[in-house]
Amino acid sequence: MQGQENAPTKSVGVASVLAALNSFTEIVRYLNNRRSKGAVLEMTSEAAVQDVLFVMLRPWVLDLVYENPNDKVGGSFSIKDFVSHSGKFVVEAKYIRSSDHGKRISIELNDDIENYRYHRSCDDLIFFIYDPDGYIPDAAAVERHLSTNRVYDGKTLRCHAVIKP
């Protein structure tokens, strides 16, 4: 539309991002069963999940940035999947690739929380976990464990989790 290039950008809230992420399975199903003979999305890697999430979120989160190095923490760099500086949130995507990975995912996610708590553009940390084969033994418990507020040195980090088959 004419004149929108100078319009102020309004950040999309975390609730809207979570609602979009909860539609992931339906969106992938639609794209893989559409009437046209387009490419089928093979959801067999974390990179494939990241691609779909970016396509889903980018039209609404205009400052969504893909794969930026996080500040150095404990001698190593962490790569966050997406960040919105105006929304002050990070979206971290995970693809559960095996039964062993499903059993260890809580440790990996807790390590991520430790890294993101220091990032100045991360008031909300959103985990999207794609577990197509149901390898996480108790996905509801993992989701409950992750979806809580944590306070570090007076700074609150709100964590959210969406786990989809």
Image (spheres, helix red, strand yellow):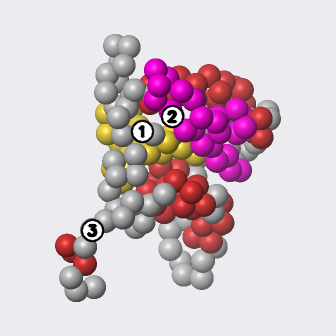
Determine whether the residue tagged by mark 1 lies in a helix, strand or loop.
loop
- Three-letter code for the amino acid on which mark 2 is drawn: Leu
Q: Which residue is mark 3?
A: 8
Q: Which mark is residue 62?
A: none
Q: Residues within 10 Å of mark 3 (few under 14, many from 20)?
A: few
Q: CA distance from mark 1 to mark 2?
A: 7 Å
Q: Which residue is drawn at the image coordinates 19% and 73% (left, top)?
A: 6
Residue 23 screen position, x and y as percent = 63, 63
- Is residue 40 depicted above or below 90 in this figure? below
Q: Which residues are the magenta region?
A: 142-165
Q: Are marks 1 and 2 in contact (CB under 8 Å)?
A: yes
Most distant residue in the bottom direction: 2
- Is residue 151 depicted above or below 122 in this figure? above
Mark with earlier residue (1, 2): 1
Most distant residue in the front direction: 154
Q: CA distance from mark 3 to mark 2?
A: 27 Å
Most distant residue in the top direction: 75
Q: Nearer the viewer, residue 82 or 147?
A: 147
Q: Which residue is mark 2?
A: 157
Determine whether the residue tagged by mark 3 lies in a helix, strand or loop.
loop
Tell me if I can see residue 80 in this picture. Answer: yes
